[in-house]
Image (tube, helix red, strand yellow):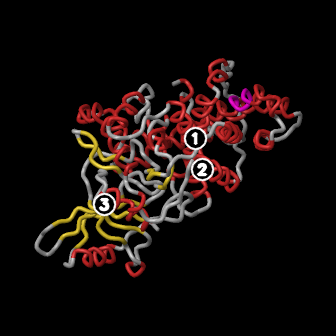
Amino acid sequence: MSRVDEAALAAATSRWLGAPVDVVDLHRLSGGASRETWSFDAVEPSGTRHALVLRRDPSAAVGNSARATEFEVLRAAGVGGVAVPEVAYLLDAADGLGDGFVMLRVEGETIPRRILRDDEYEQARGALTEQLAAQAALVHAVPTASLPEMPVLGAREQLDQYRGIIDGIGEPQPVFELGLRRLAATAPDATEPRLVHGDFRNGNLVVGPEGLRVLLDWELSHLGDPVEDLAWCCVRSWRFGNDDLPVGGFGTVDALLAAYAAAGGATVDPAHLGWWEAFGTLKWGLICAIQAHTHLGGFVRSVELATLGRRIAETEWDLLVLLVPDAVATAAPFRDPVADATPRSLQDRPSAAELLEAVREFVEQDVQPALEGRGGFHARVAANALGIVERELVLGPSVDAPVVARLTTLLGRDGSPRELVTALAAGIRDGSLKDRDDDVVAAVLDVVRAKLVIANPHYAET
């Protein structure tokens, strides 16, 4: 599902307004890897314009609520004083537009790199931590009786859920196996279930120069532990390079928790927050894997979804930093890979890697600057994907070799890189390597660093 029938959308909107309208300026917004989000104006014959947004499913996705549920949650949250877009109407099957709903459009900035860097949002950056904390307190105070039927997903339920996701993906995940084992041993006790936004972070905010305007993207909402939301907005992936400010790249944890308590939220134990931050890091890594397989399986073909598969290494590194910080800090320097200059093919130069380099430079220097919005965003993603392939072609064998040697020694068997990583993941899961924990952690670190050299060479340096 990639196009919207404008006539069908006009008919549905006319039914809601009780007056005929034309749909104009219909375009898909950037981002929204798991949901389609379309901006449009509905224009009445009198000239009155209604600024609207269509939100619909491209396909079913694990862990997401149905759009009808999201619609009702938004309505209940709005009644509870949460800053959310006002919902307009829910699509029905007769509309022929799929599963979705329409809401009123709120103008403002949603792109994190602009929020964190542009001068226009300097004042907003100083206010966002307190504003976000106040909104979290309101979200968690929404009466559960006002909500539609929703799953209860506390710590234990989500550990089971994401264990099932690993099994469903069918890819070896040594870091996540190690993470699940350690997180299961320290999971917080169940709390009274409250409304949890589920994707409470920079990137799901509409921001103006004055600060937060509304919270977007409630498709992961559920009942559970409120601390999950506070920790999720501290996950490194949502700092967008501003790693010195853990809360969304604009604030500190101390300021977030103090403002949350001042707004009526409970006092939060830092260890409780830390558990959910580690779990959130693991969760995002597995969501990246899900999204990549959505592309690979042909459900939604997208360069954005495809490249998310290579971002898994970033979350693996972040999880190790949180769970085994001493091992990360004392790990031996990773050997710099040296490209093999020997020609590997009968083909003339430029080599495959050199051709990719030329295409990447063209996309970065010519294509991306000429595009705006979703096209510009995907051009940037495509250039990054080309760089990953370029590095893998040149450096892959020299990066893999020492890691394969370490795994061969640890596991006492030969095999391909995939076979060895699969055996490592299985040994962590079944406990057969538990008496060699230090060696396992060292091997896992090497696997992740080898992947980062290709996927994002400087990530582990920051």
Q: Nearer the viewer, residue 277 or 124?
A: 277
Residue at the (50%, 41%) spot, across then down: 384
Q: Is residue 350 above or below residue 79?
A: above
Q: Nearer the viewer, residue 329 or 260?
A: 260
Q: Work out how far the residue at label 2 is from the one at label 1, CA to CA, in angstroms.
A: 9 Å
Q: Is residue 78 above or below residue 396?
A: below
Along the polypeptide, which appears first: circle 2 or circle 1?
2
Q: Count neighbours of disc 3 (C-alpha within 10 A) and say few if under 14, some if 14 to 19, many if 20 or more.
A: some
Which amino acid lies under the numbered mark 2 shown in the image of this protein? Gln
Residue at the (75%, 41%) spot, across then down: 425
Q: Which mark's residue is nearer the viewer, 1 or 3?
A: 1
Horizontal relation, residue 101 to residue 25: left or right: right
The residue singled out by tag 1 in the image is: 279
Which amino acid lies under the numbered mark 3 shown in the image of this protein? Ser
Which amino acid lies under the numbered mark 1 shown in the image of this protein? Phe
Q: Nearer the viewer, residue 337 or 164?
A: 164
Q: Which residues are magenta?
A: 441-446
Q: Which mark's residue is nearer the viewer, 3 or 2?
A: 2
- How far across and down, in percent of the image, does residue 207 sit? 28, 43
Quadrant for residue 278, please give it.
top right
- Tag 2–tag 1 contact (CB < 8 Å): yes
Query: Which secondary structure is most common in the magenta stretch?
Result: helix
Horizontal relation, residue 171 to residue 206: left or right: right
Q: Work out how far the residue at label 1 is from the one at label 3, CA to CA, in angstroms.
A: 34 Å
Along the polypeptide, which appears first: circle 3 or circle 2?
3
Horizontal relation, residue 221 to residue 275: left or right: left
Q: Residue 158 got which mark?
A: 2
Q: Residue 39 got which mark?
A: 3
Secondary structure under badge 2?
Answer: helix
